[in-house]
Amino acid sequence: MNVQKLLHGIDGVSTWVGKAAAWLIVVLMAVVCIEVFKRYILNAPTAWIFDLDNMLYGTLFMLCGAYTLAQNAHVRGDFLYSSMRPRTQATLDLVLYVVFFIPGIAALIYAGTFFAADSWRIAEHSNVTADGPPVYHFKTIIPIAGALVMLQGIAEIMRAVICLKTGEWPSRLHDVAEIDVVGEQLANSQYVDEESRKVAIERAKEIDEVARQRGMGGDLNT
């Protein structure tokens, strides 16, 4: 199998899971709205609603981790990283993935598996409220999310290795196209002369291209 297809395949799995999990925000919003109506209009609050909200948000947060990594969207202090050459970036990424990422996520999967197993064994329920809802299905998400992040992390390690060999970051499967907001605003501005507008738009394009090559690791349109 072509390595690029394999990388895009892993990106696709992470993206699909992230998009599917994103629908939980709609469910969470509906639950909150219904509870507000019940609590303040009907004066009939639900005792376990806090637990349900936590589980919905926690599931969303965990399952979107691999998707965020696939989009290269996790927060990083890149004021130095973005100015480095691709091979330097790849070397730094590879070291950090091997030293910190793999041991940390492996520990999460290992501990999360036993954590979830114990929860199922005792049929654990929430103790936040009296007669709280079951939480063993929620805790099962921990090792599942960890495994997905680990899979995507392996793809990122492969990207770093390829960059070390070729000097260029391989493309990644991107979800949506970027919108050049700055360029559009300058193009429509009535208070900037034509020459300044053209210079500013070209400069914005150059900055965007640098971000694509260095910060985002490849061609956005692939």
Image (cartoon, grey):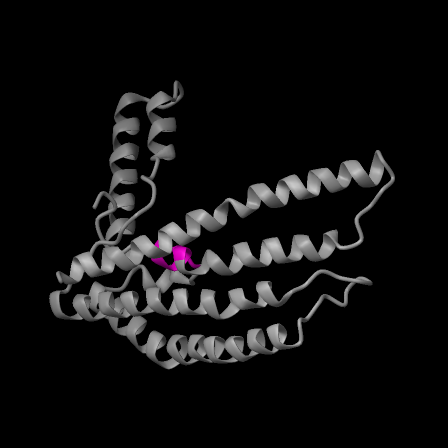
Q: Residue at x 30, y 48 (%)?
A: 174
Q: Nearer the viewer, residue 122 or 147?
A: 122
Q: Which image quarter: residue 160?
A: bottom left
Residue projecting furthest to the right: 43
Residue 24: x percent and y percent? 55, 47
**Magenta segment range?**
67-74
In the rendered view, would you say 92 is above or below 68? below
Residue projecting furthest to the top: 190
Residue 179 part of the magenta segment: no
Residue 205: x percent and y percent? 26, 39
Is 122 displayed left or right of 70 in the figure?
A: right
Q: Nearer the viewer, residue 61 or 208?
A: 61
Look at the image and tell me in which quarter the N terminus lies.
bottom left
Q: Which image quarter: residue 197?
A: top left
Visible in this render: residue 31? yes
Residue 57: x percent and y percent? 60, 54
Residue 209: x percent and y percent? 24, 46
Q: Which image quarter: residue 103?
A: bottom left
Q: Nearer the viewer, residue 39 or 162?
A: 39
Visible in this render: residue 215? no
